[in-house]
């Protein structure tokens, strides 16, 4: 039976700095709180495949989704065989999110280790999917087949997501972007949107945490900075730090009702699923108190 990610899931980078036992405990609690999916990023800690095994092995029902597995970090054959193995071991519970932002005139490095270039984003992703689909099958075939989504932001990548995969997983976007994505992809493709939130009734403090989050992406993630401009934000919103207008559009902050209202706005705009990333003033800390407080409103 194919698992459903439900309406609301949790998105987090915060597993990265914690030992496996603590991550297992947190994942099991997220499941018991009633959330439909656990989404996790891939940065410089655990790799996307290893993190999936850890989270799936610690839970029984919840969908575990990479958000995203970076295509620059592994070859298509390796990704395809890992996808099949996870799909067989945990039927219907593994959702593979794919993305990557390498261009053909740069050779980025991580701690001095060169990451191989892949080419322009759309062509690269199409070829990567082709290569995954062509990977030979020399073992059991998972039933149901694992599902894939793309970390799509621009119109062409959103179109590819609808054409070649289950759907899209836009990150760092506005409600207006959700409406546009739905229009581009049509009514049938899955649309699972990330929404950053700060649960804090001290509005000034909450806005400061939100602004730090937005500033980090604007300064360090060119693809996100470009998408912000595509969404209608200009120099007045990005140069010298993010404007309040931009911060408020990207991050929801305040009490439970305010955060619930933003999630519902995404659903009204066409989202099938919203994965909530809780931000705190303690980067890397597991926001279990916030996950617990939000669960009755979001995961019910």
Image: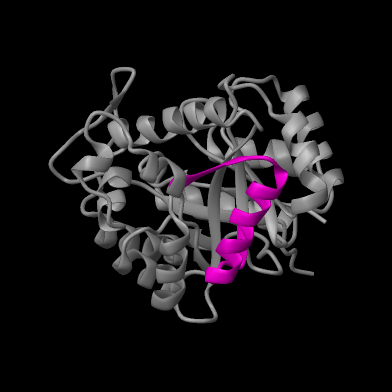
Q: Residue at x 31, y 68 (%)?
A: 155
- Tell me, yes or no, whether the highlighted magenta stretch contains residue 256: yes
Q: In this view of the protein, which residue sits in the foreground, 99 or 222?
A: 222
Question: Quarter-wise, where is residue 176 in the image?
Answer: bottom left
**Left/right of residue 91 with respect to residue 47 in the rendered view:** right
Q: Which residues are magenta?
A: 250-274
Position in image of residue 183 (x %, y %): 42, 77
Q: Nearer the viewer, residue 234 or 104?
A: 234
**Location of residue 152 in the rendering, given as x and y in whole percent from the top left corner:** 40, 59
In the rendered image, residue 90, in percent from the top left (x then y), is placed at 75, 54
Whether residue 58 is visible: no
Quadrant in the picture for residue 219: top left
User: In which quadrant of the rendered image does the C terminus lie?
Assistant: bottom right
Residue at screen point 55% across, 49% down = 195
x, y percent for residue 235:
19, 42
The residue located at (68%, 64%) in the rendering is: 142
Secondary structure mostly seen in the magenta stretch: helix
Does the magenta-highlighted stretch encompass residue 171?
Answer: no
The answer to whether residue 228 of the structure is visible from this angle is: yes
């Amino acid at each position: 039976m194919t698992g459903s990610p439900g309406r609301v899931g949790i998105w987090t980078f915060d597993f990265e700095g914690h030992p496996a036992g603590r991550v297992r405990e947190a994942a099991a609690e997220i499941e018991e709180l009633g959330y439909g999916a656990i989404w996790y990023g891939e940065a410089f800690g655990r790799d996307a495949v290893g993190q999936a095994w850890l989270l799936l092995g610690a839970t029984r029902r919840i969908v575990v989704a990479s958000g995203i597995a970076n295509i620059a970090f592994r070859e298509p054959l390796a990704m395809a065989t890992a996808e099949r193995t996870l799909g067989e071991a945990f039927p219907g519970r593994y959702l593979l999110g794919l993305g990557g932002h390498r261009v053909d005139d740069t050779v980025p490095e991580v701690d001095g280790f060169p990451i191989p270039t892949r080419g322009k984003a759309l062509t690269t992703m199409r070829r990567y999917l082709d290569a995954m689909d062509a990977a030979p099958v020399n073992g059991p075939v998972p039933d149901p087949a694992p599902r894939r989504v793309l970390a799509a932001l621009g119109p062409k990548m959103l179109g590819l997501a609808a054409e070649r995969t289950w759907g899209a997983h836009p990150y760092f976007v506005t409600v207006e972007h959700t409406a546009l994505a739905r229009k581009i992809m049509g009514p049938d493709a899955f649309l699972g949107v990330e929404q950053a939130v700060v649960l804090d009734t001290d509005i000034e403090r909450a806005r400061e945490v939100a602004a730090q989050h937005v500033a980090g992406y604007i300064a360090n993630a060119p693809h996100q900075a470009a998408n912000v401009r595509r969404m209608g934000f200009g120099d007045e919103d990005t140069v010298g730090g993010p404007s309040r207008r931009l911060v408020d559009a990207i991050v929801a902050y305040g009490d439970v009702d305010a955060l619930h209202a933003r999630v519902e706005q995404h659903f009204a705009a066409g989202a099938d699923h919203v994965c909530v990333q809780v931000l705190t003033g303690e980067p890397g800390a597991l926001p279990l108190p916030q996950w617990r407080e939000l669960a009755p409103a979001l995961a019910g």
